[in-house]
Amino acid sequence: MKPPTFFFLPLSEQAHAQFLQLVAFLDNLNLSQVSDSLNYIWSSQVFSTSKAYKALSGHTKVHPAFAWLWKSTC
């Protein structure tokens, strides 16, 4: 398949080679008809900011002020 010519400005040789590489990659891409789904690392289908915070912060010790701030209703 001949790559489309979307570009009207002269491309550098490197940019043109990268473009052709991208076209080749996309030509070989197999798409499925299966719907996408989100899977959270905490094994729940429901998003929770507190669970996301715990997952992102890991097991590091945090200052007590942050615990107070997290529990505030602001």
Image (cartoon, grey):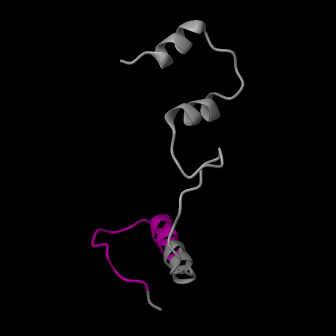
Nearer the observer, 44 or 41: 44
Nearer the observer, 11 or 51: 51
Residue lying at 63% horizontally and 27% vertically, measured from the top left: 57
Does residue 42 lie above or below 25 as drawn? Answer: above
View extreme (bottom): residue? 1
Residue lying at 54% horizontally and 80% vertically, measured from the top left: 32
View extreme (right): residue? 59
Does residue 69 lie above or below 45 as drawn? Answer: above
Does residue 2 lie above or below 30 as drawn? Answer: below
Left or right for 21, reference 16: right
Quadrant placement of the C terminus: top left
Does residue 5 lie above or below 2 as drawn? Answer: above
Residue 59 placement (x, y as % from top left): 72, 25
Residue 71 placement (x, y as % from top left): 49, 17
The answer to which quarter of the image holds residue 4 is: bottom left
Instruction: Specify start and end residues of the magenta stretch as a single range.
Output: 3-20
Nearer the observer, 3 or 69: 69
Magenta run includes residue 10: yes
Residue lying at 52% horizontally and 83% vertically, measured from the top left: 27
Q: How many marks?
A: 0
Residue 37 placement (x, y as % from top left): 53, 63
Residue 1 placement (x, y as % from top left): 47, 92
